[in-house]
Image: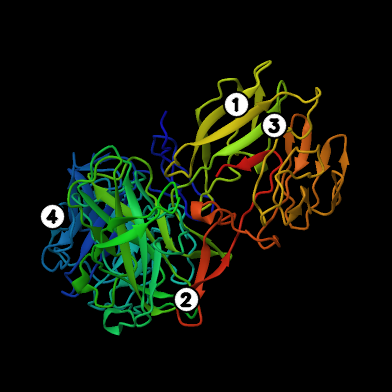
Amino acid sequence: MKRAKNLSQICLQLGVGIVGVGLYATPVHASTSGLVISEYRVRGPNGANDEFIEIANTGPAHTVESSSGTGYGIAASDAVVRCSIPDGTVIPQFGHYLCVNSVGYSWGSYPAGVGLLASGDATFATDIPDNSGIALFSTDVPLDFSLVTRMDAVGATTTDALYREGLGHPSIVPFSIDSSFYRNLSTPSISVPGFATLTPGLAEDTDDNATDFVWVDTNGTSAGAGQRLGSPGPENLSSPVTGGGLVVSLLDACVDASTAPNFVRDLTSDPAHNATFGTVEYRRTITNNTDQPLTRLRLRVADQRTFPAPSGVSDMRSTSSVDTVVTVDRSPCDGTTSDVPVVGTTLEREVSQPNGGGFNGSLSVTLAVPLAVGASIDVRVHMGLQQIGLDSFTFVAEALPGGGDASPVLFCMGATVVDDIATFCITPTATNDDYIVTADSLLTVLASEGVLANDLDLDSIVTDVVVESSTSDGTLTLAADGSFTYLPDPGFVGVDTFSYFISDGNSSSPPAVATITVEEALGGTSESGGGSSSDDAGSESEGSTTDVGSTEGSSTTDVGTTEGGTTDVGTTEGGSTEGGSTEGGTTDIGDDSTGGGDSSTIGGTTVSPTDTGAGSSDSEGSSEDTADGEALGDNGGCSCSTDGDGGLAPLGMLALGFVGITRRRRR
């Protein structure tokens, strides 16, 4: 069974278009041809001729077939063709084509393919005037230039309407600095980490240049079109390409994303290296889930808190790092540690970025040997801090020969804060489950107690749950939200199992096993499913059996402190739970928390699980099995801000505990 769904992963909780399984679907607002002008500049350190125009393919591999002439025309608003993309040229999926001014282009030393540089796929020698517009046409015959043949355009507000989309982006003061306009991959805002694009990871195209394009330069200069520290990043046909087959997860999934070894904070001040307030480092594992070995790998910055950051927001500067060795405790998270090599990343064209890297920068990962299909490499990303506050860093992985067929994925490092909830992009984790049912009875489990209830996806974007192997002694029906029904075969008593995995749209978890114990009815009847199930959502209980308003011995639930098998969930006396009522085998468990929770039905008996909620538990053990990476709240992770000594500290951690009637968490 295919275990990875090629869907577009979204790091934040926003509505977006999703790519279908195994197929590419044109994203919302993407060009109908797939080709867009993705980055350009008409001036640089070498003066007015230091120019380039980059074309990106946001769709499937595109073969150039002009409507007239001999290719697609890239023309400035003077209607003069600067470059022609010849008929028959194939621009790979998510690949690029680069047109440069051979007189002054200064980024020819920027890395591209293996051993190759970002030279022009085509060249021109006629200057493009400052604040001009540029258009891509399906023809290279100027007399045929029109809105009908125009494929894309970008220009300043002062240019002709044929050479811009919408009203155009703001005009800029013509400084000869290292700058460029590029299409937004995530968000153009330094202070707001949420996605401002409906196609995260792909060049945004809403037909409005003012919305779609971000202006950056290596000094964070204010030139009239916004002020953001960043760098040009011209890419050509040989450059690495992105894709959903490049999967990033935590270096050590046994601990959360905000602690070592996944996150490291160093308070050592180093102003000379853009680290006045020390550094932060993120460590991740990149897995090759494409269908080919990778010979080149790098990370493209899509979003970064950087200069000029407002008060309360970090000013982060990406920089190069060296290889190191890190101690980790990986699955099965039993405290057995090992040392793993972690590869440093190199800020490409660092000599041109004296203030450190920012928006649109790239960090190269050195591959000593090709990264085989299914293999992983551990990497570190190093950031200097020039100001302390909320931090986040979002990137797109790029590779050769390709990143896979699915839409590219944005991976979040640090704490991206949305409504005070931090989200991280990592591989989901499925946890084993246990259920009990009486022979010849239907087990009905709602989502609140279903197989997803104790599974972990730190970015809370699980899109699918898939049965890998079904039950053998009964009939199973599993829904996408984790709810299911199970009917044992007539007369069957014993243990039945099924395995499943979860997907977050980018990667799938290892399989988990759900065990269903089918017990013989006691005296011909059974309430609340019988048997025993446990869940630690509070302190340790004394005694192995807890009466939660149901038949004696029907469930074991650790909620608060119990003595002699009595649980204080409200007041329990003689098998009756106050705060709810017990009549005819139906138990509503009282709850002082908000949210209430959904109910689960077992063998015709409906019970309401206690919703511990964030901050609602007054017992110990509010975060359950964090060593196993199980409990980080509904959205997981934590926000980061400055603590008293200038370090990054958690603002809040959501602890998620489960009070179960029908299940127990397998340890």
Residue beneath label 2, please?
Answer: 389
Q: Which mark is residue 116?
A: 4
Q: Nearer the viewer, residue 395 or 415?
A: 415
Disc number lying in front (2 or 3): 3
Mark 3 = which residue?
444
Crowding near the residue tagged with mark 2, few <14, some 14–19, many ≥20 C-alpha atoms within 10 Å = many
Q: Earlier in the sequence, mark 1 or mark 2?
A: 2
Cα–Cα gap, marks 1 and 2: 52 Å
Residue 306 horizontal/vertical position (percent): 39, 73
Q: Secondary structure at mark 1?
A: strand
Residue 572 sits above or below residue 164 on the image:
above
Place of residue 142 in the rendered image (x, y in percent of width and height, measured from the top left)? 22, 52
In this orientation, which residue lies closer to the viewer: 58 or 522? 522
Q: What residue type is disc 3 on?
A: Thr
| Residue type highlighted by circle 2 | Gly
The mark closer to the camera, 1 or 2, is 1
Look at the numbered discs 4 and 3 and tell me whether their residues touch, using CB distance below 8 Å. no
Whether residue 651 appears in this view of the structure is: yes
Tag 1: amino acid: Val
The first of marks 4 and 3 along the sequence is 4
Residue 154 visible in the displayed image: no
Which residue is the site of mark 1?
495
Q: CA distance from mark 2 to mark 3?
A: 47 Å
Q: Are marks 1 and 3 in contact (CB under 8 Å)?
A: no
What kind of element bears circle 2? loop
Mark before the other along the chain sequence, 2 or 4: 4
Q: Quadrant of the N terminus?
A: top left
Where residue 92 sits: x, y (%)? 25, 43
Q: Are marks 2 and 3 in contact (CB under 8 Å)?
A: no
